[in-house]
Image (cartoon, rainbow, N blue to C red):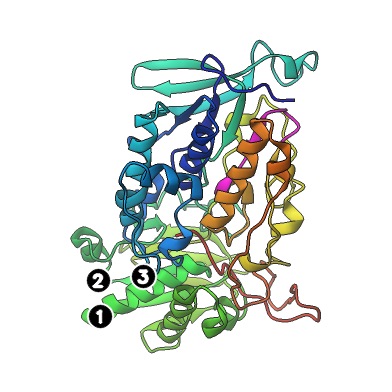
Amino acid sequence: MTPTPQPDRPLVVVGAGPIGLAAAAHAHERGLAVVVLEAGESVGHAVAEWGHVRLFSPWSELVDDAAGRLLEAQGWTRPDPDGLPTGAEWVERYLAPLAEALRHGGVEVRAGHRVVGVAREGRDRLVAIDRADVPFVVHVETASGHEVLRASAVIDASGTWGQPGPLGADGYPAAGERACADQISYGVPDVTDPTVRARLAGRHVVVAGAGASAQNVLVALGELAEADPSTRITWLLRRGDATKAFGGGDADELAARGQLSERARGVAESAKVARLTGFRTAAVRRDDAGALVLTAVNGRELTDVDEVVVVTGYRPDHSWLSEVHLDLDGELSAPRLLAPEIHPAHHSCGTVSPHGADLLRQPESGLYLAGMKSYGRAPSFLALTGFEQVRSIVAEVAGDHEAAARVELTLPESGVCGAGPAFDEQVGGCCGAPTPVAVGVGTTR
């Protein structure tokens, strides 16, 4: 059993994003000692990195219950529940005020503190004796040097930002991908930024990926091509059929997500975009003129490329958890017990069962994975899911096992059956008979 957090052995939450701060709010509400460690220079650093992107979820689904109670007690006014904020607005109007409210309540929220290791005090992973009887030690890099904190329990809500999937189709960067990094970017570019706009306008831009982020990129580049018709767009898909890349449209219970898929479909089917399907990138090189040449596994080439925007998802970093005991699914890198509930071959975000501490706790007693990181490589994570995860986890850490086990959550359906990474013409799904599968039908962004 996890010892109750105390000031000298607090609950340590890794990550001051939406889920990490929600965990801190629940811990504060229960009177638990808690410290939040954020690698970035400010809270919500990862969200701010994609601050120009508008979220699918409305404000009503972006404010954790305990966090809302804490903020309102200090005079905070909730935003319009139907409004759809950008990432920057989410930080400015909710995450930053929440961090200040937590600090005002005595919670330590430390920015510029990068966690580089978690272990049991005096024991590496091979030492089994009395592991649960000694505290965790959390190794942290700060501007002033290396620090070590003792902790009774650890919630890893560090997310997956900073670990983008590569252009290479086999899970590793393609040959030459790193060497050509000055012409390859990852994530959704902000085409309203003059520097980014100048880099992409009037150029041949390749979009690699098929999820919601790729749809955002297609819409943004479509608008750029309207302003500068000399802009050329090629949509690169590993699958053999581009029609499988779109979501549920009007059937999506998150209206903004359905609208995005329809807008992206319109751009993709227009004369602005050339589609290249079944292209699995194996190598990237520059030609004599400095343009990129992409070579597929089967030898096909895409030439005269100026810029590549890679939106192939993100993956978790478990390297700093190498000295604790983990139980992860070999395919998704998610907690093993959670993996069947979130596998994209069988679920969209609306069909995921409510879950909490019981599926997220690790064999290392007192260690939990939560938030986007708990989904590993699976897409379709929603903030609502993370809020309920940490409510349950904090209840268990506090010894309230009844509340921890009582997990209730209704998620919005995506309007599609699944989001599995099928290979070429393979199909599958969660609704009975095999049906076409759509890729990446929802994220928190």
Up-down relation of residue 116 to residue 8 (above or below): below
User: Residue at (21%, 80%) from the top-left corner?
Assistant: 227
Q: Are marks 1 and 2 in contact (CB under 8 Å)?
A: yes
User: Image check: 220 left or right of 433?
Assistant: left
Under mark 3, the amino acid is Val
Asked if marks 1 and 3 touch (Cβ < 8 Å), the reply is no
Q: Quick check: 305 left or right of 229?
A: right
Residue 34 at what x, y percent from top left? 50, 27
Residue pictured at 44% horizontal, 16% vertical: 146
Q: Secondary structure at mark 2?
A: loop
Q: Mark 3 sits on what residue?
A: 205
Percent across and percent down for residue 433 are 81, 81
Q: What's the distance in space between the residues labelled 1 and 2, CA to CA?
A: 8 Å
Q: Is tag 1's residue or tag 2's residue first in the polypeptide sequence?
A: 2
According to the image, label 2 marks what residue?
A: 201
The question of residue 366 being in magenta is answered with: yes
Give the residue type at disc 2: Ala
> How packed is label 1: few (under 14 Cα within 10 Å), some, or many (20 or more)?
some
Residue 303 visible to an observer of this rendering: no
Find residue 90 and report its image quarter. Answer: bottom left
Can you say whether 263 is above or below 387 in the image? below
Q: Residues within 10 Å of mark 3 (few under 14, many from 20)?
A: many
Residue under circle 1?
A: 230
Q: Secondary structure at mark 1?
A: loop
Can I make out residue 152 in this image? yes
Badge 2 crowding class, 10 Å Cα cut-off, few under 14, some 14 to 19, many 20 or more, is some
Above or below residue 152? Residue 48 is: below
Three-letter code for the amino acid on which mark 1 is drawn: Ser
Q: Quadrant of residue 30?
A: top right
Q: CA distance from mark 3 to mark 2?
A: 9 Å
Chain part drawn in magenta:
362-372
Q: Residue at x 36, y 67 (%)?
A: 83
